[in-house]
Image: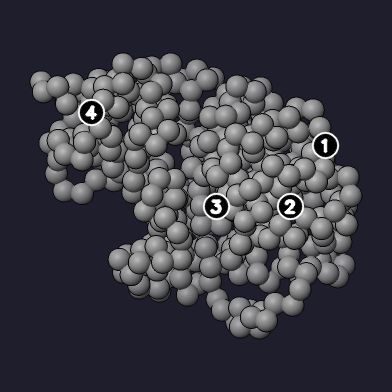
Amino acid sequence: MTESLRPLQTLAERFDSDVFEPRGGHARVRLLVDGRDPWDALLEGGTARLVPVRGSADATLAANAQTWRAIARDARGGLDAYFRGRLSVRRNLHLGVGFLAATVPTAGGDAGLRFRMVSTRRGRLSMFEAGSGPALIAIHGLGATKASFLTTVAALATRFRVIAVDLPGFGDSDKPLGASYDARFFARAVIGLLDALELDRAHLIGNSLGGRVALEVALQDPGRVERLALLCPSLAWRRQRPWAPVVRMMRPKLGLVHMAPRPLVEAVVHRLIPNAQEGWTAAGVDEFLRAYLTPSGRAAFYAAARHIYLESPHGDDGFWPRMSKLEPDTLFVWGKRDRLVPVAFSRHVADALPHASQLELDCGHVPQIERPRLTHAAVAEFLEQGAPVRAAVA
């Protein structure tokens, strides 16, 4: 056995299908050492075995030889190397991280990352969780997946049972055709997850669209929510929306016949998103493309985006009058460089919810990834103590 192959063989031998099982029971994970010496880990029949490279892979993991040796020596080193940027995961973050988690011998306990597909009244939802204690449900943003909360799971699993879920229409969850994919629909899905997991109450943390969904859960069923941590949540625009008439005419089902090839979609995404081929951003783009390049995933994306833009801010059933009745204690975290949900929304939140805590960070739209230490410290303190963080800037 060659020196470069030895640590990869160790990982394959440690693979535990009770921690992670690929969808369909079969997957090919390509393992690269120093960008060369590739081998495939073939996941099938509840086992992993190394085989020569063949065809295309479902996910690719790449690191230098020293990192692979460190991962083989330290059972928990794989995820740590990923978080530190020493190991890259491309094409399918769910599969790549699941493979790493399943190579940790003690991962079946409360401390390790655990993957599940949960059957609910609203369909099957893909999730991973870690830790024990008070439940904390993490809800991702538009076009993202549960993987955007990997840092949160890692940071807070010592204090909470952190459960990151793919919303219907995204990631590895079911993508029902004809679903409304508005905030109320997603909220019912989250409540269905609480029921399936037999959780009477839980804290909720949401980023962007996920923040709006968390709010909707609290508005629909406040008795199920302990506290809310909202990271750059998408909120109804108070100003005039000039494209509203055009957007109303658009139908999400157009996504079912969208025929743009992957290279063209990738080129557009890379032009729109800075550093789209680096680190966390590259992995997030991969996750977006994985769903968007399927007809049902596109339809879900278009429908959700349409509802975000068209949500009515005023009136008897408008967003802002409804939010003024929010019951659970809430922390809003804003990014001072966020171009999607401007920090100016904090003034409207202060008017509607004068007792809410607010924190401004020097970051963009995804605080849990861009400023993880400050974000998670504030969230943990707030969820545990309800400590006010009003108008703080960091």
The residue identified by callout 4 is 65
- Tell me which corner region of the image, top left, top right, bottom left or bottom right, holds residue 119: top right
Q: Which amino acid type is marked by label 2? A: Glu
Q: Which of the marked residues, 1 or 4, is nearer the chain's N terminus?
A: 4
- Contact, mark 2 vs mark 3 (Cβ under 8 Å): no
Give the side of residue 351 with respect to residue 206, left or right. right
The residue identified by callout 3 is 168
The residue identified by callout 2 is 216
Question: In which quadrant will I find the C terminus?
Answer: top right
Q: Which circle, 3 or 4, is nearer the viewer?
A: 4
Q: How far apart are marks 2 and 1 (CA)?
A: 22 Å
| Horizontal and vertical percent position of residue 276 | 41, 56
Q: Which amino acid type is marked by label 4? A: Ala
Q: In this view, does 305 lie above or below 368?
A: below
Q: Which of the marked residues, 2 or 4, is nearer the chain's N terminus?
A: 4
Q: What element carries label 4?
A: helix
Q: How far apart are marks 1 and 3 (CA)?
A: 33 Å
Question: In which quadrant will I find the N terminus?
Answer: top left
Q: Which of 308 and 223 is in front in this view?
A: 308
